[in-house]
Amino acid sequence: MITLPAVTLALALTNPVQVSSCSISQETTTTSSGDSPNYEIIGSLLNIRFVNGGTTPVSSVSFAVTEDGKTSTILDRGTFSPGVTISHTFRNEPFAFEASCRVQSVLFADGSAWMAPNDRPDPASANR
């Protein structure tokens, strides 16, 4: 008996979610000393703006975020309707000044999924 996984991997080659911007903003605090304010950086925020370009609502998007040569993953969950621009901000490592983001995978509300071609497992290596 063969059982199928609960999640079906979409075979579409085109990424259903497009990142329109990925940027870092500095989180600061202000103190006053006499007539001039002093600004102190206390952290940074990662700002990701993206659009579900498909026709099915998305329930989560996994982003690969690269900063200072290190890549980490951020999972954003919610209900992301087709054609709607989503802007989310995440706390980030202090003193990061620039980042790049790409979509690793998408889980649709119907249970199907999409994975970036360079993140898909090699079928040949599964047989080893």
Image (spheres, rainbow, N blue to C red):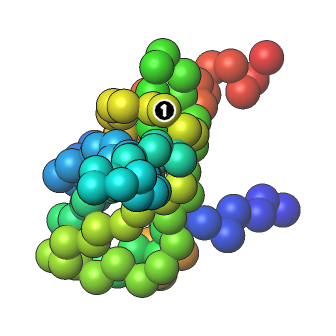
The quarter in which the N terminus is drawn is bottom right
Residue 76 in percent (x, y) is at: 50, 64
**Foreground residue among 114 and 62:** 62
Residue 56 in percent (x, y) is at: 31, 78
**Foreground residue among 115 and 40:** 40
User: What residue is rendered at 45% in x and 44% in y?
Assistant: 40
Is residue 97 shown to the viewer in this render? yes
The quarter in which the C terminus is drawn is top right
Q: How many badges with numbers are in the image?
A: 1
User: What residue is rendered at 53% in x and 47% in y?
Assistant: 42
Residue 43 in percent (x, y) is at: 52, 46
Q: Judge left or right: residue 7 versus residue 120.
A: right
**Foreground residue among 88 and 120:** 88
Is 72 rendered above or below residue 114?
above
Is 74 rendered above or below residue 93?
below
Is 29 rendered above or below residue 123?
below
Say what amino acid the circle numbered 1 marks: Phe
Is 88 rendered above or below residue 13?
below
Label 1 neighbour load within 10 Å: few <14, some 14-19, many 20+:
some
User: What residue is rendered at 72% in x and 27% in y?
Assistant: 126
Image quarter for residue 31? bottom left
Residue 102 in percent (x, y) is at: 35, 40
Secondary structure at badge 1 equals: loop
- Residue reaching furthest front? 34
**Foreground residue among 118 and 29:** 29
User: What residue is rendered at 41% in x and 52% in y?
Assistant: 33
Q: Judge left or right: residue 122 versus residue 39.
A: right
For disc 1, the marked residue is 95
Is residue 114 shown to the viewer in this render? no
